[in-house]
Image (tube, rainbow, N blue to C red):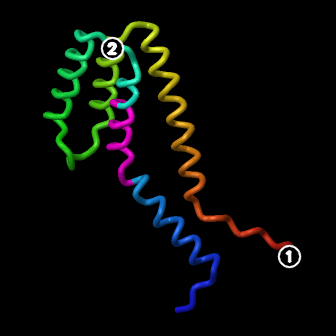
Amino acid sequence: MKFTPLILSALLALGAGAPLLANAQQSTHRGMMANLRTLNLSDQQRTQIRQIVTQYRSAHPKGSDPDPQARKAMRDQVMAVLTPDQQSAFKANAQRARQQRKQLEENARPPQPEATPS
């Protein structure tokens, strides 16, 4: 089978993007934890958040099926621990991360062939 440069580049792009999509849940969780580290949390907040995350992880070990409702409940509990200023900073950081992820996904997409006039 002969691969044209366009098909070959599309296959390579798909292969490069697959790990991004496969690890979406895990990277989202890691992203949330990294986002929390940028906030100036008190010792009490750290302890409360650690308890929330530990409870979530014990109910949803690595490799288990994703549970978006449980993840949202965990996030809501964590947000309740934060002050209004910390919540604003958390949301702004999360928005920046989403934009960066979107840009990475767009760069990983194979180029679309140009339509030729009939």
Left or right placement of residue 70 versus residue 28 in this view: left
Which residue is the extreme one toward the right? 117
Q: SS class of the residue under badge 1?
A: loop
Residue 5 appears in which quarter of the rendering?
bottom right
Q: Position of residue 21 (x, y in %)?
A: 42, 53
User: Dividing the image into 4 quarters, which one contains the C terminus?
Assistant: bottom right
Q: Nearer the viewer, mark 1 or mark 2?
A: 2
* Disc 1 to disc 2, C-alpha distance: 62 Å
**Residue that mark 2 sits on:** 41
The image's mark for residue 8 is: none
Q: Secondary structure at mark 2?
A: loop
Q: Which residue corresponds to the image point at 37% horizontal and 54% vertical from the top-left?
A: 22
Instruction: Please provide percent x and percent y for residue 112.
Output: 67, 65
Name the residue at 27% across, 12% down: 45
- Above or below for 19 versus 96: below
Q: Main secondary structure of the magenta part?
A: helix
Indicate which disc, 1 or 2, sits on the residue closer to the N terminus: 2
Marker disc for residue 118: 1
Image quadrant assignment for residue 13:
bottom right
Q: Amino acid at mark 1?
A: Ser
- Residue 71 at what x, y percent from top left? 30, 31
Residue span colored magenta:
22-33
On screen, residue 83 versus residue 67, left or right, reads: right
Q: Look at the picture and state if 106 lies above or below 42.
A: below
Q: Quadrant of residue 115?
A: bottom right
Residue count near mark 1 (Cα–Cα under 10 Å), binned few <14, some 14–19, many ≥20: few
Q: Where is residue 42 shown, x and y percent of the image?
A: 29, 10
Tell me the residue at 49%/26% (across/down): 93
Compare residues 107 and 7 and report the one nearer the observer. 107
Give the residue furthest to the bottom: 1
